[in-house]
Image (tube, rainbow, N blue to C red):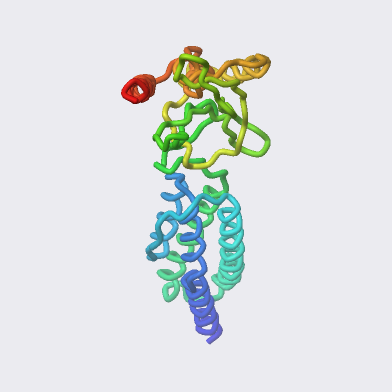
Amino acid sequence: MFKNSCTAKILYLLGEIQNHLHDGTIKHDLNQIVRHTRDTEIIDICERSSECLGIKLDVNFYKPSREQHIRSLKHLEKHLKWAKEKFDEVIKLIPECDFQWIESPFRETEIQLLSLSNYFILLDKIPDTNDINGEVVKIGDLVAISCKDDGDKNYDHYGVVIASSQGFRIAHFFTGATVKPQNSIVEKGFGYVHELNYHPEWIVKQHLPQTVPYSLVEERIKESRTIEKRVWNKLRYNCEHWAREMFNGEPECTQLEMFKKEIRNKRNQVLDS
């Protein structure tokens, strides 16, 4: 009679654990993590966690948020802790029960709890930073953001990803007011090296090769800051020239032909007038 009582108690506890695991909390917090990251490894772990419980995640990416990841992971760990404590009660009752009646749900619950424990440990990592295309962003990367000039023409403004205590930042070269010297329609001005926080709209153009140490990029940027009154010139030395020089040592501009065409059109307009 005592064995029957223990068996019933265990089945009741296992039922409580399953109700707890499937009460929507785990699904909600896994969804929240997926909704706020583009880190493919983290997304895969969340999907495996949900499969472990036979549930399906049903959200799309919204925006990156490391804070949301941390909050949701804490909720998951707390939720799992309660289930594991209940399972410890089950284990204490095992010697007094008729195991054949509880073996199947016991083994299934044990596997679920072990799997979730492992998955939640793997989730305890800093998510990758990704651009809006899902590309992983790394320090030293050459990046660009789509902009419009004063004439409403599209162009890419370039920069380099740098490390800081506040996370990834962008070092870029820009100019304030520009002038057109006499007999010239090419804009010029003094350029400055500036920093701003990374945002996913800065698209990765090239990753820093593994053979190139980031310290070399840092040294180039540091040296660039010491140059006073460096001239920004739309054709000869613009933001892309600077960024590529910091990135690989060569001041190049892939947008040069576009800029030259734009300037030729302006020159023709002046002549026609």
Which image quadrant for residue 264? top left
Q: Quadrant of the C terminus?
A: top left
Which image quadrant for residue 58? bottom left
Which image quadrant for residue 230? top right
* Image coords of residue 83 (percent x, y): 56, 68
Residue sitting nearer the eye, 186 or 118: 186
* Image coords of residue 44 (percent x, y): 41, 49
- What is the count of numbered marks? 0
Residue drawn at x 52%, y 68% as measured from the top left: 25
Residue drawn at x 39%, y 34% as measured from the top left: 153
* Image coords of residue 189 (percent x, y): 57, 21
From this view, report whether residue 18 is shown above or below residue 271. below
Left or right: residue 62 versus residue 223 is: left
From this view, report whether residue 232 is shown above or below residue 3. above
Q: Residue furthest front?
A: 273
* Image coords of residue 265 (percent x, y): 33, 24
Residue 128 seen by the camera = no
Residue sitting nearer the eye, 173 or 110: 173
Residue 78 seen by the camera = yes
Residue sitting nearer the eye, 67 or 184: 184
Residue sitting nearer the eye, 259 or 227: 259
Q: Residue furthest bottom?
A: 1
